[in-house]
Amino acid sequence: MSENSPWPKELRLRGEGSTLLISFEGGESFELPAEYLRVESPSAEVKGHGPGQEVTVPGKRQVRIFSLEQVGNYAVKITYSDGHATGLYAWDYLHKLGSDYEEIWNAYLGDLEAKGLSRD
């Protein structure tokens, strides 16, 4: 991580694990839905092992976050109600998910529709 990398000030679960609130030292704060974080997991299960291997994950509308576990000084491991617990969310990646939420979420919804998949 570089000197200019976003650094989290606070991570807090809200709504019985339905949302992660993350605040950064620069003053930015994001409320990220559990479903969004789950379907954008940086794990190999979702992102694959290389370009073009990404998977569109359906059926996660009701997923909740069970726990957060800091990993070193660079990431957090999120455990979900569906048992998914792989993939480390680096601070840079969480910041990107927050900053680019609309673009990423709309692309995901478009992928679901194009593939005939559902959030339920």
Image: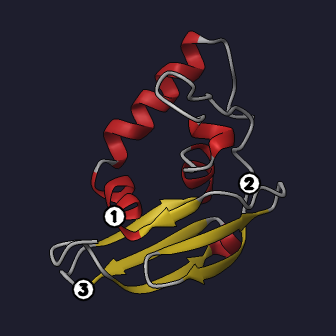
Residue in the image at 34% along x and 42% along y = 102
- In this view, 111 is above or below 11: above
x, y (%) of residue 1? 29, 71
Tell me which numbered mark, 2 or 1, is placed earlier along the sequence.
2
The numbered mark at residue 92 is: 1
Rendered image quadrant of residue 40: top right
Mark 1 or 3: the one toward you: 1
Q: Is residue 64 above or below residue 119?
A: below
| Place of residue 77 in the rendered image (x, y in percent of width and height, measured from the top left) | 62, 70
Real-space Cα separation, disc 2 to disc 1, in angstroms = 23 Å
Q: What residue type is labelled 3?
A: Glu
Distance of mark 1 from mark 3, alpha carbons? 13 Å
Q: Is residue 21 above or below residue 33?
A: below
Seen at 57% across and 79% down, the residue is: 71
Dot in front, 2 or 1: 1
- Residue type at tag 2: Val
Quadrant for residue 54, please give it: top right
Q: What residue type is labelled 1?
A: Asp
Side (left or right) of 7 relative to 111: left
Residue under the image location 53 percent in, 70 percent down: 20
Give SS at disc 3.
loop
Residue ID for mark 2: 63
**Front tag of 2 and 3:** 3
Indicate left or right for 94 with 61 as reference: left
